[in-house]
Image (tube, grey):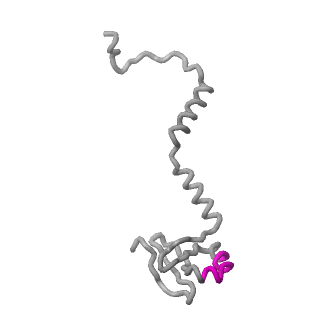
Amino acid sequence: MPSIPYYTNKLNKLANIVILDTNIVMSEWKISEAKARLSEVVSSCVDEPQVLYNRKKAVAALIDMDEYEEFLAYKQAQKKPTMEELLDELREINKVEEDFGELPPRTNRPDPDFD
């Protein structure tokens, strides 16, 4: 199955059903058609994503707000912390655990300073 959207059948003159390799069904709209029927496009995005095309190139997708919030949560979970954030976290840990106590003596290898 190709990795880009492909057409399976025509729904009507204005919208076509598009199936991606992830088996998600989407409606396709030209931007001028979507402008003319904006309320229909927006209400349809609750049921399935609506893809907007400009000169046969996908330029935008309208999705349900719940799906968008899931995407934002996923994106936030994938975000790697910056060095500044990691150092701030270490500073907070040091504030809570100021006294580390006695460090145990090294047992896995000899100390090079004291033979």
- For this view, does 40 lie left or right of residue 9? right
Quadrant of the rendered image containing residue 70: bottom right
Residue at image coords 52%, 78% = 54
Q: Position of residue 102 (x, y in %)?
A: 51, 15
Q: Is residue 115 above or below residue 57?
A: above
Q: Residue furthest bottom?
A: 13
Magenta residue check for 87: no
Quadrant of the rendered image containing residue 48: bottom right
Q: Is residue 114 above or below residue 95?
A: above
Q: Is residue 36 above or below residue 75?
A: below
Q: Is residue 71 above or below residue 17?
A: above
Residue at image coords 57%, 34% = 88
Residue at image coords 39%, 73% = 2
- Image quarter where the N terminus lies is bottom left
Q: Residue furthest top?
A: 115
Q: Which residues are magenta?
A: 33-43
Along the viewing direction, whichever of 19 and 82 lies nearer the viewer: 82
Q: Position of residue 98 (x, y in %)?
A: 59, 22
Number of numbered markers: 0
Residue at image coords 47%, 69% = 22
Along the viewing direction, whichever of 105 and 113 lies nearer the viewer: 113
- For this view, does 17 lie left or right of residue 2? right
- For this view, does 111 lie left or right of residue 31? left
Magenta span: chief secondary structure: helix
- Image quarter where the C terminus lies is top left
Q: Position of residue 58 (x, y in %)?
A: 50, 74
Q: Position of residue 25 (x, y in %)?
A: 53, 76
